[in-house]
Amino acid sequence: GENVEQHPSTLSVQEGDSAVIKCTYSDSASNYFPWYKQELGKRPQLIIDIRSNVGEKKDQRIAVTLNKTAKHFSLHITETQPEDSAVYFCAGRGSASKIIFGSGTRLSIRP
Amino acid sequence: NAGVMQNPRHLVRRRGQEARLRCSPMKGHSHVYWYRQLPEEGLKFMVYLQKENIIDESGMPKERFSAEFPKEGPSILRIQQVVRGDSAAYFCASSPSASLDGTDTQYFGPGTRLTVL
């Protein structure tokens, strides 16, 4: 069945450094990959998404890359700030319309 | 334009009672999705509904759980005879449509935190 795997489960980086979160997916029909940020006790918020006809997308300090051949995609956060601390979820959506989420990465930014 | 609304935000039930969770999608959105999030875990898909239709309920337990999205009013997720293992945050999300290539963005509500005593 459909599956999305996410690594690492926890990540701690020094403020100002970059953070990278990686995901792989199993459904070759998946063609939409959103990333959500969830702060403690709050709803998941969409931060960036990428569609299968694009290899890379950037929005200020956040970028996402997609390799359809290898079926993996990554989130890159540059110049990390304290407010970037949260749990980040990757997700994949195929023809069945439901979104399959990764297990999440807890990102901590050290001052 | 109000976002996705969910109520109640917190719900406490004793074992064996019923829990009823409501979700009002964003204006103009006709597709609703329910997810469950256990403490310290990710989001698990439960059910996908359009107005008056269940499209995909593959993630919903076969017993005690049901969902509806009537022509008028919010979507309802109903849990009968709750057990402690039902304690979780339940999020709904809405999208304007489920495009043929599956790319419509889903926007999440604030969630209902269910506690079963």
Image (tube, rainbow, N blue to C red):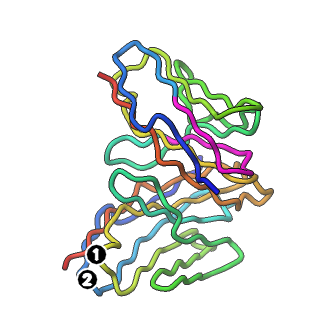
Q: Which residue in the rendered view is the most extreme toward the front?
A: B1
The residue where tag 1 is placed is A82
User: In the image, which disc is placed on residue A60?
Assistant: none
- Quarter occupied by the C terminus of chain A: bottom left
Q: Earlier in the sequence, mark 1 or mark 2?
A: 2
How many numbered marks appear? 2
Q: Residues within 10 Å of mark 1 (few under 14, many from 20)?
A: few
Q: Nearer the viewer, residue A10 or A39?
A: A39
On the image, the x and y values in percent for residue B96 come to 73, 53
Q: Return the residue nearer the eye: A25 or B68.
A: B68
Residue B39 drawn above or below residue A99: above
The residue under label 2 is A15
In percent of width and height, residue A43 lies at 45, 53
Identified by mark 2, the residue type is Glu
Residue displayed at 46% across by 43% down: B111
Contact flag, marks 1 and 2 (Cβ < 8 Å):
yes
Element class at badge 2 = loop
Start and end of the magenta stretch?
Answer: B21-35
Q: Circle 1 — which element?
A: helix
